[in-house]
Each structure stands twice: as C-alpha cells, then as structure tokens.
Image (cartoon, rainbow, N blue to C red):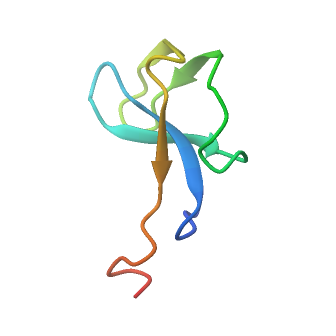
Amino acid sequence: MYVLIPGQWYLRYTCKECKSKQILFPDLSGGTAEINAEYVIKCLECGHKSTYDSEEIERYQYPLETPENA
C-alpha cells in the first residue's frame, strides 16, 4: 500500500467484486501518458483476483488539501 502524496497522480482500478477503489501505482507521467496495458491484480480489500485492461484503469490525482494533510 502507498502513502498518498497530495497532488500526486496515481493509476487506480475498481475491484470487480467488492467495488472498492485501489491504487495500482504512481503515474509517473503526471496524468498525461496513454494507458495501454493489462494487469492481473488481487484486491487488497476482498482478495478477489482479476484482470484489468486500459479501459478499466483510471487516473487519479490525490487532492492537494484534505482533512488529513490540511
């Protein structure tokens, strides 16, 4: 699991089983690169293992100001 950094971009997916949003890894392109890959991932919440392609992976920018980092 990652410690999320305010303003940092990440790639994330939504578990097909429990629907929780999970961080895959930091997006080193800053949210600009085309996602063209397929990943086999085991959900950290429910343990469901599934394949996620570029259509199911989304970009996520952690908010600059949250109650935790304000």
Q: Is residue 1 visible?
A: no
Q: Residue at x 51, y 25 (%)?
A: 42
Give the left or right position of residue 24, taking residue 61 as reference: right
Q: Where is residue 32? Give x, y as percent.
A: 63, 41
**Outermost residue toward the bottom?**
70
Quick check: 26 above or below 3?
A: above
Q: Residue at x 64, y 27 (%)?
A: 34
Q: Where is residue 19? Give x, y as percent.
A: 27, 30
Q: Where is residue 68? Give x, y as percent.
A: 39, 80
Give the left or right position of residue 7, taking residue 37 as reference: left
Residue 24 figure quarter: top right
Q: Residue at x 36, y 26 (%)?
A: 15
Q: Is residue 48 visible?
A: yes
In the image, 14 versus 28, the foreground residue is 28
Q: Where is residue 21? Give x, y as percent.
A: 36, 39
Q: Residue at x 43, y 20 (%)?
A: 56
